[in-house]
């Protein structure tokens, strides 16, 4: 299997927007995934914020062309459930040595969360260089990313938390950013109300912002 660190870097390079997906009813998972794809987004980070997360992952993996991972993974038990359900990558809000160990032992790309030099160094010690900067805006925003990039030039960040249409271009155009995460294009409310056309429209708008910013 390919090196999981390289796989994480390639995943983010191919997916400049990784939606943070919260779905309560697995019956909505397939249509929600199709709505993202129709808007040009090809990945989904299904969070373990609901009891249905594992089942939602299993359903979403049925959507051809959509790369499905698990987010808010805070312990190895969740990581195992996610992988058993079909998740192909893991994301955590912080750095957990036990989740990192699970990822390394099981060959699963993992993006751990960081927001300071200490956690970045802990991740680097285990070979992880694609890291989630979270909560992005509350942790100081782009000035902090720029400051951290100086001593850690090999790190690429996935910024999540406080990013939306108004500041997406500024974030995604920064060279330290591999991709961004967010839920504005696929809100819990729109999924619950089966407003899939809105998800497609918002996804397409987000991808257009990315294309313009990266020209």
Image (tube, rainbow, N blue to C red):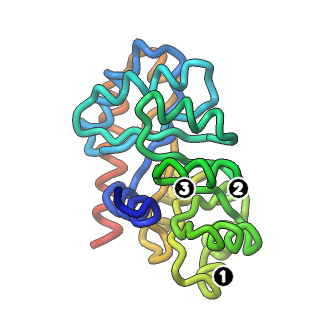
Q: Hey, which residue is sitting farthest right in the picture? A: 118
Q: Residues within 10 Å of mark 2 (few under 14, many from 20)?
A: some
Disc 1 + disc 3, Cβ < 8 Å:
no
Residue 33 appears in which quarter of the rendering? top left
Residue pointed to by mark 2: 97
The picture places residue 203, in percent across and down from the top left corner, at 34, 42
Q: Earlier in the sequence, mark 2 or mark 3?
A: 2
- Compared with residue 170, is residue 202 higher up or lower down, i.e. above or below? above
Quarter of the rendering occupied by the C terminus? bottom left
Q: Which mark is residue 104?
A: 3
Residue pointed to by mark 1: 147
Q: Is residue 56 left or right of residue 144?
A: left
Q: Point out the frontmost of discs 1 and 3.
A: 3
Residue 36 appears in which quarter of the rendering? top left
Q: Measure the alpha-carbon separation of dots 1 and 3.
A: 29 Å
Q: Earlier in the sequence, mark 1 or mark 3?
A: 3
Q: Point out the frontmost of discs 2 and 3.
A: 3
Helix, strand or loop at mark 1: helix
Disc 2 + disc 3, Cβ < 8 Å:
no
Of 84 and 18, the residue lying toward us:
84
* Any part of residue 169 in sight: no
Helix, strand or loop at mark 2: helix
Helix, strand or loop at mark 3: helix
Q: Earlier in the sequence, mark 1 or mark 2?
A: 2
Q: Is residue 214 left or right of residue 77?
A: left
């Amino acid at each position: 299997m390919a090196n999981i660190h390289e796989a994480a870097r390639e995943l983010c390079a191919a997916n400049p927007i990784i939606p943070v997906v919260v779905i309560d009813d697995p019956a909505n998972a397939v249509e929600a995934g199709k709505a993202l794809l129709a808007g040009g987004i090809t990945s989904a980070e299904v969070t373990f914020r609901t009891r249905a997360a594992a089942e939602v992952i299993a359903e979403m993996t049925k959507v051809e062309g959509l790369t499905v991972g698990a987010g808010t993974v805070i312990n190895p038990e969740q990581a195992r459930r996610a992988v058993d359900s079909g998740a192909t990558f893991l994301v955590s809000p912080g750095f957990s040595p036990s989740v990192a160990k699970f990822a390394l032992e099981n060959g699963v790309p993992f993006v751990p969360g960081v927001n300071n030099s200490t956690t970045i160094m802990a991740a680097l010690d285990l070979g992880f260089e694609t890291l989630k900067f979270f909560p992005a805006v509350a942790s100081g925003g782009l000035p902090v990313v720029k400051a951290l990039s100086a001593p850690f030039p090999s790190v690429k960040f996935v910024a999540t938390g406080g990013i939306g249409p108004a500041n997406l271009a500024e974030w995604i155009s920064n060279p330290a950013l591999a991709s961004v995460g967010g839920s504005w294009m696929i809100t819990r409310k729109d999924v619950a109300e089966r407003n899939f056309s809105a998800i497609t429209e918002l996804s397409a708008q987000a991808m257009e912002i990315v294309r313009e910013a990266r020209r």
